[in-house]
Amino acid sequence: MSYDALVIAAHADDAESQMGGTLALLADAGQRILLVDLTAGEPTEFAEPGVRARQAAEAARILGVDRLTLPGQDRLLMDTLDVRLQVARLIREHRPRWVYGTGDACVHPDHAAATAITRAAVFLARLGQWERVPGPAGERLADQEPWAIDRLFFPHCKMEPAWAEFAFAVDVSAVYDRKRRALAAYSSIFQVEGDRLLALYEAEDRYYGRMLGVGYAEIYRSAAPLLVESPTVFQPTVHG
């Protein structure tokens, strides 16, 4: 099955917190999106094993996207050749135009590993001649055609300090309630009422929205400079 975009994240809830509004907008526009969680996110703070997976499926349903979980271990995720090749295979299999990773992560070591894994997998997926690479590593990709994505983007990780500069922002005001509901599905990691982290996450989206003259916005950096056909594609903001 082909997808328009793959979102590579360390844990279920990362994609929702970083870009849940964008995911809802893309799904509503008819794009097929696959969330790839590199770990199952276990153990969790407030639930038994397996609960978070069911909540992740519900969050994906709310946003209108698909989800796949790889067998990495939460808290111990490492940027290894094996994980790089797993993700590269997914990119070559699903042939997305866009890939989203986790941007400039250093607070949570799993997030930092996910950033490096995503960058490496995007590069490896576009290379040919794997049959000439000796050993098991070459065999892992030799049976697939190369695939080069159009763009690699990084939403802001909510655990990290705020960005003073970013490449672009998406106005997610119209779908923000769906983002709230997707995050609220994770009662295994967030408190049902008055969760401090959820309040901080929403405050960030409101802050960037205010900066841009909208209710809520999600911000992104780009792996390479942005190129547009015309500067008329940009929306007006309060500061011109």
Image (tube, grey):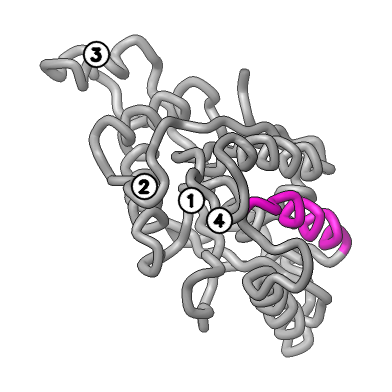
As drawn, 114 above or below 225? above
- Label 3 SS: helix
Which residue is labeled 1 in the image?
101
Foreground tag (4 vs 1): 4
CB within 8 Å, label 2 to label 1? yes
- Label 1 SS: loop
Q: CA distance from mark 4 to mark 2?
A: 30 Å
Which residue is labeled 4 in the image?
45
Quadrant where the N terminus sits is top right
Residue 233, percent from left and from top? 73, 62
Question: Which of 192 and 153 lies nearest the eye of the viewer?
Answer: 192
Magenta segment boundaries in residue numbering? 174-188
For image coordinates 21% across by 12% down, the residue present is 131
Query: Which class describes the residues within 10 Å of circle 3: few (<14), some (14-19), or many (20+)?
Result: some
Residue 209 placement, left or right of 142: right
Query: Sequence-wise, which precedes: disc 2 or disc 1?
Result: 1
Query: Which residue type carries mark 3?
Result: Glu
Which residue is labeled 3 in the image?
139
Residue extending furthest left? 134
Query: Which residue type carries mark 4?
Result: Glu
Residue 108, percent from left and from top? 40, 63
For image coordinates 56% across by 43% down, the residue present is 7
Which residue is labeled 2 in the image?
119
